[in-house]
Image (tube, coloured by chain):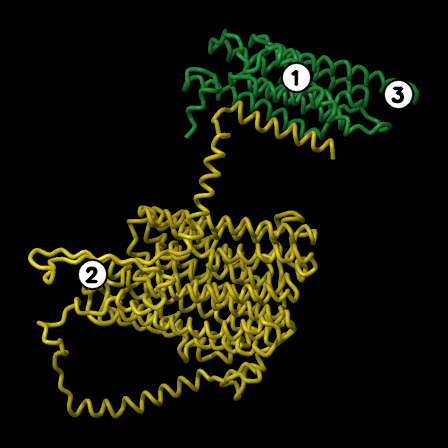
Amino acid sequence: MTELFLSGIVVWLAGAMASLALWRQPSAARRVGCGTALGGSLLVLVGSAAAIFSGSSAGISLPFGNPVFSWAIRLDPLSAYFNVTLAALAAAVSLYSFGYLRAMEGRRNLGAFGFFFNLLLLSLALVFSASNAFFFLVAWEVMALMSYCLISFEHEKKGTRNAGVLFLIMSHAGTGLLLIAFLVLASASGSLDFSSFHLLASRLTPLQQGTVFLLFLFGFGVKAGLVPVHIWLPKAHPVAPSNVSALMSGIVIKTGIYGMARVFFDFYGPPPLWMGTLVLGLGVASALLGVLYALMENDLKRLLAWSSIENIGIILMGFGAALMFRSLGYANLAALALIAALYHTFNHTMFKGLLFLGAGSVVQATHTRNMERMGGLIRHMPVTALCFLVGAVAISGLPPLNGFVSEWLTYQALLAGFGTTHSLTRLMFPIAGSLLALTAALAAACFVKAFAIPFLALPRSEEAADAQEVSFPMRTGMAVLALGCVALGLGATWFVRVFDPITQQALGVRASSALVTARGLALSPGTAHGGTISTVGIALFFLLAGAAFALPLAMRWRRRSVSGPAWDCGLPGLTDDNEYTATAFSKPLRMIFSALYRPRREIQAEYEVSPYYPSAIRFESEIEPTFEKHLYDPLRQWIMAVANRMKGIQAGSINLYLAYIFITLILLLLFGVRA
Amino acid sequence: MLMTHVLDLQIGDRIVTLMAALVLVLQIAMVAQRWIVIHIRIFAAQSFFLAMIAATIAWFNHAPHLYVAAALTLVVKVVLVPVLFERLVKRMGIHEEIEPIVNGPLSVVIAGGLTLVGYVVAESFYRPGEPGLGHNALAVAISLFLIGFFTMINRRKALTQVLALLSLENGLFLAAISLTYGMPMIVELGIFFDVLVAAMVLGILVYRIRETFESVDVSRLRRLRG
């Protein structure tokens, strides 16, 4: 198992080198880069899946290194689970890339792309399996650098470069927080090995405990896209090539989730109650703000990026609830909430990867990310449309697909929380639960927009009218993920067993047998007032009901069907100008939440004869970027002011720089003598 | 037999202290020196005494591999580097005086102050009763290092800064041999190789700086600032 995993890593490494060496032959570089990415993914997938069920946490240490910084890898159930998530997505994305990158041949350096791509996968796998803080941070930084290179791959656009730099700055700031936190832990344990950190954090003083917790929360939160450190995500994810966006939103942000899971449930024992409450609160804020901003987007990929923030929020709600249950001593409920969060992590990887691949297909066919210039694509791109629809239904949390199962589990965990304590914090649970319901409803509205505007009705531009279905590998990549979404929904009762080794390790509970009822056909949270669902049953019901309605319709259709033009209110024919636009679709919500959005709009009409007959109308509408304006702009100004003041010491003179070093040295020497 | 050995050690200690004092005096002389060729020759003389210190320690403490270090010091720092630099000076036609940033008398006063700092710092390392060379050698070593550093700050010409760097390195060498009676051979070889390469690279660099800026005055590098 570990051997398979390691051989996958070696394949990725070899693929990175080989595709770089082949950079002069774009076609060969593309085939080698994508082929090794696919092969490595399959090896890691099988190796990690076997490792989850073997129950042992096999460890291995690479032969170079020293006692402090060992290159140690350990595939415990949590690591293996995230590696499975990674490998499943990476396999599909690699398949898709065979076709997607062909359009770039000759225009871009595909050798470099294959190098970055394979190394990104490699570093992700190492982040998920490193068991030494130093090794972990090395893999973490390689991952950040490779992400940066891939985000900035189309670097001739200024927006892309700016987004890449913003990502790099925030990522480094986050790593800085992590470094401090790991150093505090290491100084307490005397070692950098993760095994020595087990339950260590709870033995620190309360002040240290809280500080380390916050450092980890925001250090990992930056990568995950936690509000308020999320601002890089909606800028950076859309500008990357779409197969990279799928990886970024699908799995790279999950490294933050993995880090939190590792810290919260491995390094910490039962935490103080405020920690869980804080995570739950931030989760609610991320989910709600993420979906609200997603609703306002007309850029298809940016909409998906905002929706990633929403889903990270849902996952963190599960984590928060699990932490609170752990503080209150309800191990079974904690396991339920943890399962919900981890299940949603996998699900989000599947459907967000699928949606980004679908968006990539659409963008490649129409050459625009603006939904207002799409429309009617379902006629030219039926397979892409179907796959995108599956993803949209799954992410909206509709049964019987996978998003429904994990959101339902989260919801059940939150509802069960109300009876666990008598303090005021118990109010958190129903509030969070109702806000989760609101989030899910808004997400459904958001994805009605994301599917209907590009795919339905009439084309809004010539590019959309001339769109072609994408190539076979791209369709296969999307179909694999769509099937994954269906399987994770219908096979929910089978899949929850995967979490047994994880909850056993983290909380000492095996929860799946309590969750599965009705001879393995239904899920039930096993709490007092919990509900019961069966995705298989729902799917069967839909099939039967659909058949019951469709059969008579189909029979009558054959007998007398008359086709005529659609009612056009007496206008001379319907054109794309009569269509519902993306902006108009989200108008009601823009009005309801105007306190948050602070929308600004400007209408300028030009007319020649009378104001009733304008010859041209210019319409501009935008919403206020709240966090940038009220949090990051003041921060940036402050940093610039401090930097300006510090510019004085940079005189450019060697003698002065030597003097700085000299004075520092003398002071240190005298300080050392005194001490 | 034992008595003579202890006596030997005491004599050795005195000889080392005497030569260390000479090395320090030469270092201070370098601070005040205005002519570049004489500056190079003082450096050669200082390195010569350093080699003698190494040889003395090797003789009295029976550390034969220090002879190699002494020989290398002689070859590299007393012969090779000074010859290299004097040729460089001739080729570039530098005749002008060194223009220090702080004037001569004040530099000497500062160097005296740094010697004091060296003794204060060395004092904290000194454990009475422990065998070893007296704390004079270490104090001189630290003073050499600090004064060398100060000289680097105090010079405008890249070449004289390189000389200061090499005298700073002499301080490090003295500290190493006076504390440990010589590091492992391989470390010393590495250091000498380092010094030689550094001298050559810096020599080339100085030449390049002159070609580009038509001066070896490092204050002109200020133009490189963005």
Which chain is disc 3 placed on? B
Rendering coords of residue A639 (x, y %): 47, 42
Label 2 to label 3: alpha-carbon separation: 98 Å
- Circle 1: residue type: Ala
Number of the front mark, 1 or 2: 1
- Circle 2: residue type: Glu
Rendering coords of residue A303 (x, y %): 35, 63
Q: Residue drawn at (48%, 20%), measured in percent from left and top? A: B218
Dot 2: element:
helix
Residue picked out by circle 1: B111
Residue picked out by circle 3: B5
Q: Does residue A232 sit above or below A458 in this rendering?
A: above
Is residue A651 or residue A491 the one in the foreground?
A651
Q: Residue drawn at (48%, 51%), measured in percent from left and top? A: A171
Of all residues shown, which one is farthest toward the left? A609
Mark 2 packing: few (<14 Cα in 10 Å), some, or many (20+)?
some
Dot 1: element:
helix
The quadrant holding residue A471 is bottom left
Q: Quadrant of the C terminus of chain B?
A: top left
Rendering coords of residue A376 (x, y %): 22, 69
- Circle 3: residue type: His
Would residue A528 be found to the left or right of residue A236 on screen? Answer: right
Dot 3: element:
helix
Which chain is disc 2 placed on? A
Q: Residue drawn at (69%, 32%), measured in percent from left and top? A: A671
Residue picked out by circle 2: A463
The answer to whether any part of residue A197 appears in the image is yes
Q: Colour of chain A?
A: yellow
Mark 3 packing: few (<14 Cα in 10 Å), some, or many (20+)?
few
Which chain is disc 1 placed on? B
Q: Colour of chain B?
A: green
